[in-house]
Amino acid sequence: MGLDDDIAILAAAPVFEFFDSGALRLLTFAGERISLEPGERLFERGDKADGGFVVLSGTVELKGPGGTPVLAGSSALIGRTALFAKGKRPTDAVATSSTELMRISAQLMTRVLKEFPDAAAAIYDWLADDLGELSRGLETVRARLMETKTR
């Protein structure tokens, strides 16, 4: 895969869609490439999370405790929150085919956002909208639970 292919894949991934070509080029050069074979583990639930991964090719299965597995393919972003804050991985991640990923550390993300403030502002707005939507959804659930409780 060439530089332009990597940039196109990053541009299609959530969060990175807000970056211009200069920011994407910097991420492509500075991001760490990882190759996995089928069955190879990317990380385990509970591992330290200090960055995210963009799937360049192949597929990764994400599975939490008792949950339905989710398959992440090309341009999927794994670990969105870990791009901005350290934490713990909530799932196991295992390659289901030969897979290429790009690891974007939180440190690299901070550097790029400082150098490209327009992208930082767009991501801030997007995350604020996402959080607002989550909050409205939780309020709906709370109202339904209160209705059920008073019956």
Image: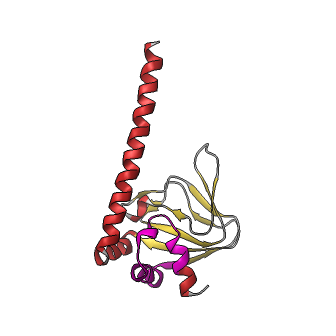
The residues colored magenta run 7-33
Residue 34, given in percent of the width and then of the height, sits at 56, 76
Visible in this render: residue 102? Answer: no
Residue under the image location 42 percent in, 36 percent down: 138
Which residue occupies the foreground of this view, 99 or 47?
A: 99
Which residue occupies the foreground of this view, 34 or 148?
A: 148
Residue under the image location 53 percent in, 54 percent down: 45
- Of helix, strand and loop, which mostly describes the magenta segment? helix
Residue 22, given in percent of the width and then of the height, sits at 40, 83
Q: Is residue 13 magenta?
A: yes
Q: Residue furthest bottom?
A: 2
Judged left or right of residue 45, residue 113 is left
Residue 23, given in percent of the width and then of the height, sits at 39, 79
Which residue occupies the foreground of this view, 60 or 115?
A: 115
- Residue 122 lies, with reference to residue 9, above or below; the image says above
Visible in this render: residue 75? Answer: yes
- Residue 54 lies, with reference to residue 138, above or below; the image says below
Q: Splitting the image into 4 quarters, where does residue 150 fall? A: top left
Judged left or right of residue 105, residue 76 is right
Judged left or right of residue 70, residue 30 is left
Looking at the figure, which quarter contains the N terminus?
bottom right
Residue 113, given in percent of the width and then of the height, sits at 32, 72
How many numbered circles are shown?
Answer: 0
Residue under the image location 35 percent in, 70 percent down: 119
Q: Is residue 27 magenta?
A: yes
